[in-house]
Image (tube, helix red, strand yellow):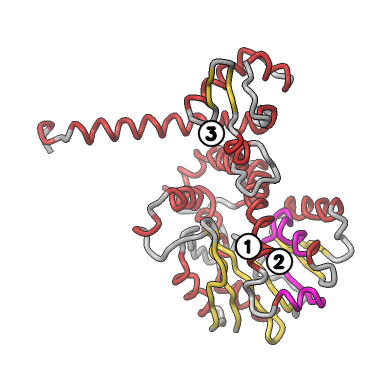
Amino acid sequence: MAVTDIDERKLEAFIGLVATEIGAAANAALVSIGDELGLFRAMADGQAVSSAELAARTGTQERYVREWLAAQAASGFLELGEDGYVLPPEHALVLADESSPFLMTPSFQAANAAVAARERLAERFVDGEGLGWHEHHHDLFEGTERFFRPGYNAHLIAEWIPSLDGVEERLREGIRVADIGCGHGVSTILMAQAFPESTFVGSDYHEGSIEAARRAAERAHVSDRVTFEVAGAKDFGGGPFDLVCVFDALHDMGDPVGAARHVGSQLADGGTWLVVEPMAADTVEENLNPVGRVFYAGSTMLCTPASLSQEVGLALGAQAGQQRLTEVLNEGGFSHVRRSAETPFNLVLEVRR
């Protein structure tokens, strides 16, 4: 293509887009610093603040805080008025409130941890090997827990469990539940708190996450009905279970078909498998949107390498979609796959034999 064939307006627009992306990439680390040091939380009252005032509130140095505030205002995270910088209440729900269902600062923590593995990931692009979940910085584990927790708090007990045919009533009466790939145990503990008559076993291959889950269960006072064990998706035991759950983990598995077969061997007659996966349509074209962008990026850096590091290495990816997931579940011995609920970020499937 000759230079004279270039559409200058298209070129200028794309340069503007790239400049925005460079700023976003650089600001991701600054958002995490603000989250870690409590800068956003110290502004959650919605009042205008100067760099000196914010530094005094948070025990930080004014000169660093001055630049940080300007960067956040330039990014649209803060507003600059005559009296100083303001964190609007709508933004506070996303950046400063740990109890908010809209909290998104943890995603920056997890993303920065994933980016820290960039050099090793570039090598995997060349050699085709995998990069295990356990090989990442510990901020990934904590950030992932904090990222998923608001959604689970908002939807798991109120919407997802009731969407399963007959399961909520059985949980109230008392059944046995397995939570596979439970990570730090957020989902397991939420169910145990809501359904004290049932018993729960959470499992994950990552020993550090299981240790964190056990501590969390003690803090939540549910250790009498919750246990956590180090086990993979194809070798967890303790069945038969009336309900098996997998939250945002099936696509990370190297052999999800083999995992499905093992779930079948551990599931009681008439039992239900709850599968929650990242929201995705069945084609790439349908997933070219802001949510799909986040999940494709995470899939490239985390989910696909994790699967490729394991036996089989099917590498479904975080945007597999219901059709592909159904094929995997059917191959694993489950004929009933129904979308029972959804959110902008979650695809919820009721699975039965």
Q: On the picture, is 117 further left or further right than 267? A: left
Question: Tag 3, which secondary structure?
Answer: helix
Q: Residue at x 67, y 52 (%)?
A: 149
Asked whether the beta carbons under mark 1 and mark 2 sit within 8 Å of each other, the answer is yes
Q: On the picture, is 126 further left or further right than 137? A: left
Residue type at mark 2: give it: Asp
Q: Quadrant of residue 204?
A: bottom right
**Extent of the magenta region:** 168-191
Q: Classify 10 Å Cα crowding around label 3: few (below 14), some (14-19), many (20 and above).
A: some
Q: Give the Cα distance between marks 3 and 1.
A: 26 Å
Which quadrant is home to the N terminus? top left
Q: Residue at x 65, y 36 (%)?
A: 96
Question: Tag 1, which secondary structure?
Answer: strand
The residue singled out by tag 3 in the image is 28
Which sits earlier in the primary sequence, circle 1 or circle 2?
A: 2
Question: Tag 2, which secondary structure?
Answer: strand
Which quadrant is home to the C terminus? bottom right
**In the depicted structure, whether residue 297 falls above or below residue 78:** below
Asked whether the beta carbons under mark 3 and mark 1 sit within 8 Å of each other, the answer is no
The residue singled out by tag 2 in the image is 179
Asked whether the beta carbons under mark 2 and mark 3 sit within 8 Å of each other, the answer is no
